[in-house]
Image (spheres, rainbow, N blue to C red):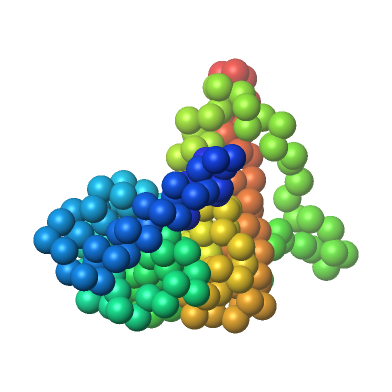
C-alpha cells in the first residue's frame, strides 16, 4: 500500500503554473459547454479517476461506472464550481464519494468494526493468547511477497465500506484527514477513528496470515 496516486498532483518546480492554466482552460470549456470539453476532461483525469475508483471499490466494472457517473456529475454541476479549491481536488472529492457510495451499496448495511475484530486476543491476566510475531522485517523477502500481497488484498476486502474507503484514501492516496472528511461528509474525529481501526484490523489479519504461513512452512520441513 505504498504506491501513491492522486487526482491533484503535488506541485513541482516550474509545473504549478502549467497545471493551473490547463485546469482553468478546462473549467472554462466545461462551463461554456464546448463540444470537446468532456473529451478534454476524460483525457486529463480519466486514468487517475479510474485508479482511484478501482482502489476503493476493488472491482473493475464498478470503477468504470463510478468514473462515468463522476464525469456526468462534473458536466452537470460545473457551474457550482467556484474555484475555492483546485479543480482537481473538487473532482477528486466527487470520484471518492461516488466510489464510496458504490461500495457501500454493494456491501449493503453499513457496520462498525468492533474492538474484538481489530485488537489481539488477551487472557484473564491481560497477556496475549497467541504469541506476537513481528513479521514486518520480512515484507521485503521475495519468497513471502506474493502471499503477503494476497493476504493484504483479502484483509482490505473484508473491511466495511467506510473503513476500506478511508484506509485507501489515507494510506494509498496520501490524502489528509480533512480532505477525506470533506470528500465523505464525515467528521475529522470519525475519519481518524476509522483509519486507526482499519489499520489495526488489517495488521491483525496479516499477522494471522503470516503465522499460518510459518506453521505451514515448519510442517513441510518437518515432514
221 shown above or below 75: above
Query: Which image quarter: residue 63?
Result: bottom left
The residue positioned 31% from the left and 49% from the top of the image is: 44
19 shown above or below 196: above
Closer-to-camera residue (189/133): 189
Q: How many marks on residues? A: 0
| Horizontal and vertical percent position of residue 208 | 61, 47
70 shown above or below 223: below
In the drawing, does residue 107 fall left or right of residue 170? left
Closer-to-camera residue (59/25): 25
The residue positioned 17% from the left and 69% from the top of the image is: 33
The residue positioned 32% from the left and 58% from the top of the image is: 25
Q: Is residue 115 visible?
A: yes
Please, which residue is most extreme toward the left here?
35
Q: Is residue 62 visible?
A: no
The residue positioned 55% from the left and 22% from the top of the image is: 143
| Horizontal and vertical percent position of residue 133 | 74, 41
In the drawing, does residue 183 fall left or right of residue 222? left
Query: Which image quarter: residue 34?
Result: bottom left
| Horizontal and vertical percent position of residue 90 | 42, 68
- For the C terminus, the image quarter is top right
Please, which residue is most extreme toward the right here?
125
189 shown above or below 142: below
- For the N terminus, the image quarter is top right
| Horizontal and vertical percent position of residue 49 | 34, 54
In the drawing, does residue 64 fall left or right of residue 166? left
Amino acid at each position: 500500500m505504498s504506491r501513491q496516486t492522486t487526482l491533484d498532483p503535488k506541485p513541482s518546480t516550474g509545473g504549478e503554473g502549467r497545471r493551473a492554466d490547463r485546469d482553468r482552460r478546462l473549467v472554462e470549456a466545461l462551463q461554456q459547454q464546448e463540444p470537446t470539453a468532456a473529451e478534454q476532461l476524460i483525457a486529463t483525469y480519466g486514468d487517475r479517476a479510474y485508479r482511484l475508483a478501482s482502489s476503493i471499490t476493488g472491482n473493475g466494472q464498478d470503477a468504470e461506472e463510478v468514473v462515468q457517473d463522476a464525469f456526468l456529475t462534473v458536466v452537470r454541476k460545473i457551474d457550482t464550481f467556484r474555484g475555492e479549491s483546485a479543480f482537481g481536488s473538487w473532482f477528486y472529492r466527487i470520484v471518492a464519494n461516488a466510489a464510496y457510495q458504490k461500495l457501500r451499496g454493494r456491501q449493503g448495511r453499513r457496520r462498525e468494526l468492533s474492538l474484538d475484530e481489530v485488537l489481539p486476543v488477551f487472557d484473564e491476566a491481560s497477556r496475549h493468547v497467541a504469541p506476537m510475531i513481528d513479521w514486518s522485517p520480512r515484507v521485503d523477502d521475495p519468497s513471502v511477497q506474493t502471499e503477503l500481497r494476497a493476504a493484504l488484498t483479502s484483509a482490505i476486502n473484508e473491511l466495511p465500506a467506510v473503513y476500506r474507503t478511508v484506509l485507501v484514501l489515507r494510506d494509498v492516496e496520501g490524502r489528509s484527514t480533512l480532505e477525506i472528511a470533506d470528500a465523505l461528509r464525515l467528521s475529522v474525529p470519525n475519519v481518524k477513528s476509522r483509519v486507526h481501526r482499519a489499520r489495526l484490523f488489517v495488521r491483525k489479519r496479516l499477522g494471522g496470515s503470516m503465522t499460518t504461513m510459518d506453521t505451514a512452512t515448519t510442517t513441510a520441513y518437518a515432514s
